[in-house]
Image (spheres, rainbow, N blue to C red):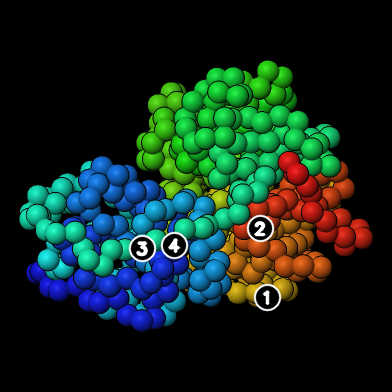
């Protein structure tokens, strides 16, 4: 594209982690990767991770600036977006463009888009999508080679320190109830906790630092674990940051990898006989039916099946396209599947970007939509399925005692309830609002809620309506 001067940042951009508004002059003398992202998008999260690696590699020659542009109404709240981005602990400037002003100034049309600006403040490249990091790296390297030595800026970028308070949990997500135990994916502490139902921590799986290491529970490492499920004496974990599925042997506490090679990507279609060698793309959820372990890969919008009896991986449904399309197996499309629940031949899928609840026939792969229309129609409405609306739901869980699907409606900070078999969607009246809840489990006569942005786990009693804090690790 022709080199033109990069537009100045308008006053309407809110800088979430800076002491003062950013100006283009502060970026001169270095290559700048200006990323237009959406904080809730799996593709954007992967692109931001790529940019963080590039910044670390190129050091003082490259600036990275991320600007969040909302899709959902709830994402216009800068505090909510700050919470979402705090999960990744980015150390570069992050702006919030609630009215799409900067987006329009740059003529951006899709998330994620990275605009590369040279040391003279001119737009040189525009990269759309979350393609291979090597393409982005090559272009950044070429621009960095053009830089000329300059004096340090007299107006440096000053980051605002702070972030989240030090608490026992940091952005918990996945929950599992098994017997008297409650398992918690303490995602941003990169560990899984085994607790009793009063909240007392019995064991910690994972060292607590990010990594991709198998072995004894105190030495092994996870990277942002999310959804989990239990089968026999094993806990299966969607280790999202490692693009892998891990197994915790509950008797010994040992951890191993059953699927995923630790890098993002999309496996080839057809039966895969070496699941540990494949590149998965941000697995966020797992669910078990017999020996079939279903895996939702949020980054490529697909549902996979891993056979625990004869290890192998195969595609169940999803074309890879980001959309809400019903149909047979690979003809159907999901929009960021983030949570799963299974009963008999029905696999229920929580589609976050589609604000939808989907159903997959596990025998045929046929996909249908229970609630939701497409990725641009969302809201907060109860009633018949054709009229009901969700906003960026984050988790689902089946009630073992009744035909009910519980839904953590993240964008509306609410707990919703869908009666299966053609019933309506209703909102559960809670004594307090939730905070970006991204995990649910049902068991022990209660609904357990990961109140993710509040760094807490809650216990809801459907019979009495009581909601209480579970003091995990306190």
Where is residue 436 shown, x and y percent of the image? 62, 61
Quadrant position of residue 386: bottom right
Q: Are marks 1 and 4 in contact (CB under 8 Å)?
A: no
Query: Can you tell which quarter of the image residue 192 is in?
Result: top right
Q: Residue at x 71, y 29 (%)?
A: 203
Residue 37 seen in this snapshot: no
Q: Which mark is residue 454?
A: 2
Separation (CA) of disc 4 from disc 2: 21 Å
Where's residue 312, x and y in %? Answer: 50, 26
Kind of element beneath mark 3: loop
Q: Inspect this view and state whether residue 102 appears.
A: yes
Residue tagged by mark 3?
A: 158
Q: Answer whether labels 3 and 4 touch (C-beta < 8 Å).
A: yes
Foreground: 380 or 45? 45
Q: CA distance from mark 2 to mark 3?
A: 27 Å
Name the residue rendered at 36%, 73% in the picture. Answer: 21
Q: Is 428 on the left-hand or right-hand side of 366?
A: right
Looking at the image, tell me whether mark 2 or mark 1 is earlier in sequence order: 1
Secondary structure at numbered mark 1: loop
Q: How packed is label 4: few (under 14 Cα within 10 Å), some, or many (20 or more)?
A: some
Q: Secondary structure at mark 2?
A: helix
Q: Is residue 127 above or below residue 194?
A: below
């Amino acid at each position: 594209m022709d080199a033109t001067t990069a537009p100045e940042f308008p006053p309407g951009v809110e800088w979430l982690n800076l002491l003062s508004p950013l100006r283009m002059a502060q970026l001169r003398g270095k290559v700048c990767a200006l990323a237009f992202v959406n904080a809730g998008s799996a593709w954007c999260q992967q692109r931001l991770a790529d940019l963080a690696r590039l910044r670390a590699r190129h050091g003082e020659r490259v600036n990275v600036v991320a600007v969040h542009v909302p899709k959902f109404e709830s994402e216009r709240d800068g505090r909510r977006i700050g919470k979402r981005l705090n999960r990744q602990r980015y150390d570069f400037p992050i702006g919030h463009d609630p009215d799409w002003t900067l987006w329009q100034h740059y003529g951006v049309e899709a998330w994620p888009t990275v605009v590369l600006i040279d040391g003279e403040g001119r737009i040189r490249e525009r990269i759309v999508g979350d393609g291979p990091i090597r393409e982005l790296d090559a272009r950044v390297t070429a621009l960095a080679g053009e830089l000329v030595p300059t004096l340090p800026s007299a107006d440096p970028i000053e980051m605002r320190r702070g972030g989240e308070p030090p608490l026992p949990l940091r952005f918990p997500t996945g929950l599992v109830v098994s017997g008297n135990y409650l398992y918690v994916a303490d995602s941003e502490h990169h560990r899984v906790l085994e607790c009793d139902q009063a909240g007392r921590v019995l064991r910690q799986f994972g060292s607590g630092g990010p990594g991709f290491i198998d072995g004894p529970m105190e030495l092994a490492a996870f990277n942002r674990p999310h959804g989990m499920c239990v089968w026999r004496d094993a806990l299966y974990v969607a280790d999202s940051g490692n693009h892998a599925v891990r197994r915790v042997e509950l008797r010994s506490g040992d951890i191993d990898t059953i699927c995923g090679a630790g890098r993002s990507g999309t496996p080839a279609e057809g039966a895969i006989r070496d699941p540990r060698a494949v590149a998965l793309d941000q697995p966020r959820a797992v669910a078990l039916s017999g020996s079939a372990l279903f895996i939702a890969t949020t980054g490529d919008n697909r549902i996979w099946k891993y056979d625990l009896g004869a290890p192998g991986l195969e595609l169940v449904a999803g074309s890879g396209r980001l959309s809400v399309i019903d149909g047979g197996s690979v003809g159907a499309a999901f929009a960021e599947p983030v949570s799963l629940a299974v009963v008999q031949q029905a696999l229920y899928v929580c589609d976050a970007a589609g604000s939808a609840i989907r159903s997959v026939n596990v025998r045929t792969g046929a996909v249908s939509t229970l609630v939701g229309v497409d990725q641009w129609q969302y809201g907060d409405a109860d009633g018949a399925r054709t009229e009901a609306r969700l906003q960026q739901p984050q988790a689902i869980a089946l009630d073992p005692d009744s035909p009910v699907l519980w839904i953590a409606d993240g964008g509306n900070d609410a707990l919703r309830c869908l009666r299966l078999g053609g019933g309506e969607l209703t909102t559960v009246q809670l004594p307090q609002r939730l905070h970006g809840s991204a995990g649910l489990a049902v068991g022990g006569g209660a609904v357990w809620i990961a109140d993710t942005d509040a760094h807490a786990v809650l216990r809801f009693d459907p019979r009495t309506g009581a909601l209480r804090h579970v003091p995990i690790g306190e």
